[in-house]
Amino acid sequence: MASGYSTTAAGGALTQEEVAGLLIEPLLAEAVVLAAGPRVFTTSGVPLRIPRIAALELADPWRAENTLIAEADPTYSELVLLPSSLKSLKVVHRISNELARHSVADIGAVLSAALVRRVANAIDKAFLVGDGAADTVLGLINGTGVQSMAAVGTPSVDDLHDAVGLALTANAKPSAFFMHPRDFVTLRKVKDTSGAYIVQPDPTAPATYQLLGIPVFISTQLPTNGGVGTNQSSVILADMTQVAVGRDQDVAVTLLPERYADYDQVGIRVTARFDVGLLNATGVVVLAGVTP
């Protein structure tokens, strides 16, 4: 009922509060690496070994009739994903049963979804820039044998062309750029001598980003505070057919109604176990030292 006062400041609002039936959370980066279409291999808790040919040269394959055919001896290697020592992603959050009962939203479902999104972002960051320390994921940037363009500075469209050239020279088929929003906007602002933007969006295309005809995946999980000036980032160009993702356990949510019973609380546990590796490292080009 009304308070009897004529203005809101004086108390002229309804004394009963209305609460919207949803919970707003901070904006999060979109998980992008899995969306870019890597090769995903699923296993059930055991290390995954992917055989590959390290080298195979056909030195002299041309032969005349009735002559000895030369042998070609390949060199084999393998990519190991999900070694037994690799850590998993795990988080537990607990809420009181009063909050669960009294909330106008399904607080358990809302918090579960929020935790899943945060775990997905942690996986994405590991896939992009993980350093592999202490039995964690080694990301694309730090992969052994990736091609690198050092000290790029302010990125230009020519830098992108050079990266594509490196990938093509390695017989890769570049299919995805990964970059921080800052660097994408810098490239989108490049103009020609007449002041027109060089990178023009296609008004007939869906709401997706592309540069040089290659899809661009934007992620704030790529840091921009590296280098001497603490303002450097990296841009990744990848042939996603050469990126392998090992999945032991997809992101899973478990309710723990008994663990915190002494506190009359319910636990929400979110776990996942992923790994990433390169089938052919030269299929990835890292543009390093990118500045505004």
Image: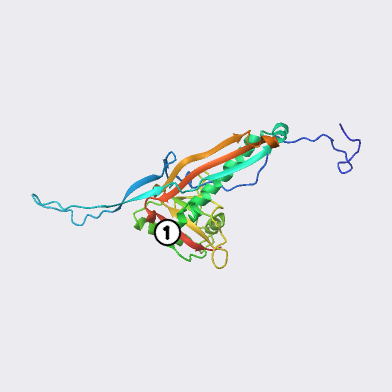
Q: Nearer the viewer, residue 151 or 75?
A: 75
Residue 119 at x, y = what percent?
A: 56, 45
Image quadrant in which you'd find residue 107? top right
Disc 1: CA contacts within 10 A as few (<14), some (14-19) or many (>=20): many
Residue positioned 80% across, 35% down in the render: 17
Q: Which residue is mark 1?
A: 163
Residue positioned 43% across, 56% down in the render: 143
**Image label count:** 1
Is residue 74 visible in the rendered structure shown here?
A: yes
Q: Amino acid at mark 1?
A: Ala
Q: Nearer the viewer, residue 139 or 61?
A: 139
Residue positioned 32% across, 49% down in the render: 52
Quadrant occupied by the N terminus: top right
Q: Residue furthest left?
A: 66
Residue 53 at x, y = what percent?
A: 30, 51
Is residue 210 visible in the rendered structure shown here?
A: no
Quadrant occupied by the C terminus: bottom right
Answer left or right for 63 relative to 88: left
Q: Residue furthest bottom?
A: 228
Measured along the vertical axis of the image, is residue 18 above or below residue 184? above
Answer left or right for 99 relative to 240: right
Measured along the vertical axis of the image, is residue 189 above or below residue 44? below
Q: Secondary structure at mark 1?
A: helix
Q: Nearer the viewer, residue 188 or 233?
A: 233
Residue positioned 44% across, 54% down in the render: 237
Q: Nearer the viewer, residue 288 or 212?
A: 288
